[in-house]
Amino acid sequence: MQPIRVFLGYDPREAVAFHVACHSIHRHASVPVAVAPVMLSQLAAVFRRPRDPGQSTDFAFSRFLVPYLCGFEGWAVFADCDVLFRTDIARLWALRDPRYAVQVVQHDHRPPAGTKFLGHVQRCYPRKNWSSVVLFNNARCTALTPEYVERASGLELHRFMWLADDEVGPLPPGWNHLVGYSPDLPEGDLHNLHYTAGGPWFADCRGGPADGSWWAELGLALGPLGAAEAGAAPRAPQGAAA
């Protein structure tokens, strides 16, 4: 049995979010899963794109290297680090459809102007957040060489302009539920929470509708350490939403 290949975006400012997301994937998985960080320090030999002043995370562009990192073979999942899986990732894996090069939740996400975590400008553009959770059919994504990912514009990459429109397939909305933005879903359809505007690991982003779920997952990840032994381990604020 080959493990499901999952790549999570990694930014050192959100290291705890990465580890909690990873824990949530493994905790619910019914089959082997191999999770790898998309970490710039591990990609220096193949990816040297200068940081764009408009990008809010280290993995804004490097996410598109996932098919290359898989040798353009098989399938892989990419997700931003600010996610929390609530159900078995094997259910997402079962949705792979060879008709498509990628499959995404096709949001019509138009956030109001303003800022999000760490004061980054909240930008609005067509297909926003489609690239935050992606099922990659790697053999059909050969355009995504390191050279191409280094030079292509952000909009070209994130809007999947390197594919024909009919190569971009759908996923059910619960696999990329934008906390605070997406319409409410029944509990059974809410598979993956995405704290796209910032999660409770940032002090300035606390008080959101799904904070309690993230704090609970952090507590499970800490396991036997417990609050006293963990010392500096963060605590959920009183009254955090479940």
Image: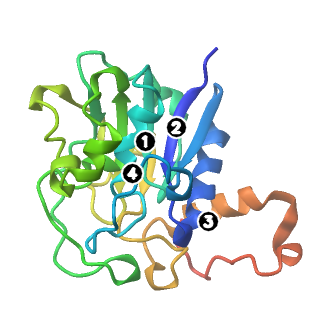
Q: From the image, tell me which residue sits under label 3.
A: 16
Q: Of the residues under marks 2 and 4, which one precedes in the sequence?
A: 2
Looking at numbered disc 2 in the image, what kind of residue is underneath it?
Val
The image quadrant where one finds the C terminus is bottom right
Colour option used: rainbow
Q: Of the residues under marks 3 and 1, which one precedes in the sequence?
A: 3
- Is 23 left or right of 90, judged from the image as shown? right
Q: Residue at x 31, y 78 (%)?
A: 120
Tags 3 and 1 in contact by the CB under 8 Å rule?
no
Q: Position of residue 240 (x, y in %)?
A: 55, 75
Task: Estimate how packed mark 4 is, as few (under 14), some (14 to 19) or many (20 or more) residues with alpha carbons within 10 Å.
Answer: many
Looking at numbered disc 4 in the image, what kind of residue is underneath it?
Ser
Which mark lies nearer to you, 2 or 4?
4
Q: Toward which corner of the image does residue 114 lie, by quadrant?
A: bottom left
Task: Estimate how packed mark 3 is, as few (under 14), some (14 to 19) or many (20 or more) residues with alpha carbons within 10 Å.
Answer: some
Q: Residue at x 61, y 24 (%)?
A: 3
Tags 1 and 2 in contact by the CB under 8 Å rule?
yes
Q: Residue at x 23, y 16 (%)?
A: 99
Mark 4 element type: helix
Q: From the image, tell me which residue sits under label 4.
A: 62
Q: From the image, tell me which residue sits under label 2.
A: 6
Tags 4 and 3 in contact by the CB under 8 Å rule?
no
Residue 78 image label: 1
